[in-house]
Amino acid sequence: MDLADLIAPEAVYPSLKAKTKKQVLQELAQKAAALTRVDAREIFDTLLQREHLGSTGVGRGIAIPHGRLATLPNIVSVFARLDEPIDFEALDNEPVDLIFLLLAPEHAGADHLKALARISRLLREPSTIERLRASRDRAALYSVLTEPAVHAA
């Protein structure tokens, strides 16, 4: 699965301003709603429910909030780099500044998991994380996010 299939250039935000985890999720829900025509409140509620199960802050300043929505026609992603890192209750207790939102239709079980795995692989690479933090504009971020996956031998 290629990330270019999951995220559009207009779904990349190089400088999101938010002070709390809740604010970030609200902002991302608004951005996703604009891309999907799904109600922002429905998206936000889905993300909040998922966070109640455990933080999607995976460590090293990265969060991958995700959820499934019955009203969503296809998988949608939004990427944001925060102006200031925030507490996201991450597994390593480090503040988060890189957030990759993933929303999938309710029926997209395997595809949702494949997309999460692909995002996780990308964000495991220290050089990729450094380049995402160093990139200041949408085009540069999108380029880093959509580079072809390097397959291990």
Image (cartoon, rainbow, N blue to C red):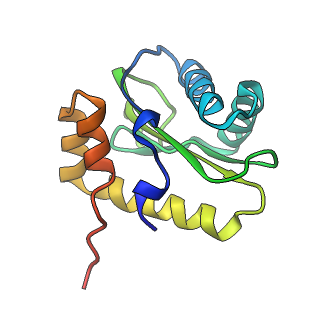
Q: Horizontal placement of 1 versus 103: left or right?
A: left
Of all residues shown, which one is farthest toward the bottom? 153
Q: Is residue 38 above or below residue 23?
A: below
Point 58% across, 47% down: residue: 76
Residue 19: x and y, percent?
47, 13
Residue 61: x and y, percent?
35, 37
Report how many numbered discs are placed on residues in the image. 0
Q: Quadrant of residue 38?
A: top right
Q: Horizontal placement of 138 versus 127: left or right?
A: right
Q: Horizontal placement of 24 versus 52: left or right?
A: left
Q: Quadrant of residue 148?
A: bottom left
Point 26% across, 57% down: residue: 125
Residue 33: x and y, percent?
65, 30
Q: Quadrant of residue 120?
A: bottom left
Point 62% across, 28% down: residue: 34
Q: Is residue 145 above or below residue 51?
A: below
Residue 114: x and y, percent?
54, 67
Of all residues shown, which one is farthest toward the right? 70
- Quadrant containing the C terminus is bottom left
